[in-house]
Image (cartoon, rainbow, N blue to C red):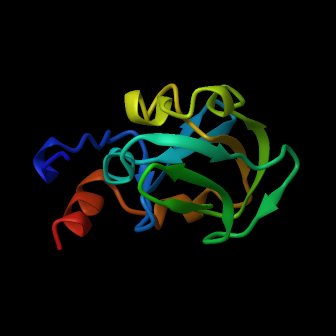
Amino acid sequence: MKTLDQIVLPDDRRYTDEHIWIKKDGDSHLVGISDFAQDQLGEVVFVELPSVGDKFDAGVPYGEVESIKSVNKLFMPVAAEVIEVNEALSDAPATFNEDCYTKAWVARVKVDNEADIEGLLTADAYRAFLNK
């Protein structure tokens, strides 16, 4: 396992205390799990993806990630509609462990209110949360 100093937290996204990140990508946003989350999970062996068209409120489970250690729900960081899912994760769930920020995004979403993202944790605030 990584030490907290080894956890990668890009500044170009916001984080939740459920270890989910969200990042602006063109006219939509990508969501996925943080480096801390994938490190804690260990080897990811299965992912349950949402369906395109599904709508979720903030804090509502939108999928699951299963590792050799545990099964964990994925919580939507803000109210949003799923407009695309990363189907490649179904065949290669270990991608979470290899590249959780670029190749292992879970869903592309259309956010209901962009201002809600500002209320999420910056990389520095998320690191401080992890250090508690």
The front one of 28 and 7 is: 7
**Which residue occupies 11% across, 47% down?**
5
Identify which residue is drawn at 49% across, 29% down. Answer: 95
Residue 67 picture location, percent across and down: 48, 49
Give how far across and how far down residue 81 sits, in percent: 79, 53
**Residue 7, position in %: x, y?**
22, 44
When the figure is inspected, residue 74 is found, relative to residue 45, above or below; the finding is below
Q: Is residue 98 left or right of residue 84?
A: left
Q: Residue at 56% x, 34% y: name it.
A: 93
Which of 77/48 is in front? 48
Which sits in the foreground, 107 or 97? 97
**Picture quarter containing residue 128?**
bottom left
Locate residue 10 relative to residue 79 in the image: left or right.
left
Q: Nearer the viewer, residue 28 or 16?
A: 16
Image quadrant holding the C terminus, namely bottom left
Residue shown at the point (16%, 66%) measured from the top left? 131
Q: How many marks?
A: 0
Query: In the displayed image of the protein, which residue is found farthest to the right?
Result: 53
31 relative to 122, above or below: above
Identity of the residue furthest to the front in this view: 68
